Amino acid sequence: MKYLTILHKAMFYLIANQDLISQNCKLAKDELDPFTKKQVVLTKTFNIANPITSEARKPTIHGQFGLENDSIYFKLQSIIIVSGGILADTDNLKEYIKFKENDYILIKFENNDTLLKLRLDYQAQVSENRSSGMITLNTFAKFNLAQEDINQFTKNKLEMLRFSKDNENEKIDYELKNVNHKDNVVSNASCFLVALSRL
């Protein structure tokens, strides 16, 4: 009888906790696609890392979790802002932030030796906007996730993220030092799991 009471309390806590999380969740998109008739879920954008000023080629990175066409993915947006001349040649920078077929990312969590390796699923073209002497380069890539991977994001804070660019034998490392950035990744992953459980 005692064990049943503990089990009921645990289940109540889990349900109440999910409701509490869901009340604070504001998804960027949660709708039925009119063409495919499948659910589209997208979390709010969260900041992962800003570049160090001395590393001009290191993009600012934003993330999102998403579900589209029954596929779960981690969307990463890369932004580079270049100042000093509207006529500057940006071809090299475009190639630098663009992901290619064999590129992948490695994710390291705090107090956890397990590395999460995500392969590229989709890469958007790099867009370029020139105004007032500033050039903004913007692109995003999607990486496939399993639901177990989302669980890792909810249980462990993101510590480091590495972009491994196979074709260029080059890697870009980001260390997450901002506590708010880490907490935003956890809360967005938690909200995403709540949304998935309701589908």
Image (tube, grey):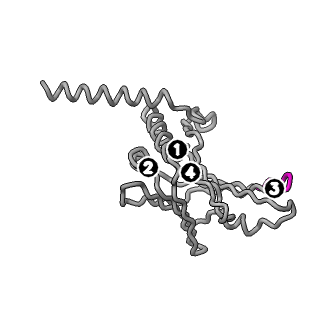
CA separation in Å, label 1 and label 4: 10 Å
Viewer-nearest of labels 1 and 2? Answer: 1
Q: Are marks 3 and 2 in contact (CB under 8 Å)?
A: no
Disc 1 marks which amino acid? Asn
Q: Secondary structure at mark 3?
A: strand
Disc 3 marks which amino acid? Met
Q: Secondary structure at mark 4?
A: strand
Disc 4 marks which amino acid? Ile
- Which mark, by number, is residue 180? 1
Which is nearer the N-term, disc 4 or disc 3?
Answer: 4
Percent coordinates x, y for residue 69 in the rendering: 54, 43
Q: Majority secondary structure of the magenta segment?
A: strand
Percent coordinates x, y for residue 26 in the rendering: 55, 32
The residue that disc 2 covers is 157
Q: Secondary structure at mark 1?
A: helix
Q: Residues within 10 Å of mark 1 (few under 14, many from 20)?
A: few
CA separation in Å, label 4 and label 3: 23 Å
Q: Are marks 1 and 2 in contact (CB under 8 Å)?
A: no
Which stretch is magenta?
128-134
Q: Residue furthest left?
A: 1
Residue 36 inside the magenta-drawn segment: no
Viewer-nearest of labels 1 and 4? Answer: 1
Q: Residue at x 73, y 56 (%)?
A: 81
The residue that disc 3 covers is 134
Which is nearer the N-term, disc 4 or disc 2?
Answer: 4
Q: Are marks 1 and 4 in contact (CB under 8 Å)?
A: no
- In the image, residue 136 above or below residue 88: above
- Which mark, by number, is residue 48? 4
Q: Residue at x 78, y 65 (%)?
A: 90
Which is nearer the N-term, disc 3 or disc 1?
Answer: 3
Q: Residue at x 50, y 30 (%)?
A: 24
CA separation in Å, label 3 and label 2: 34 Å
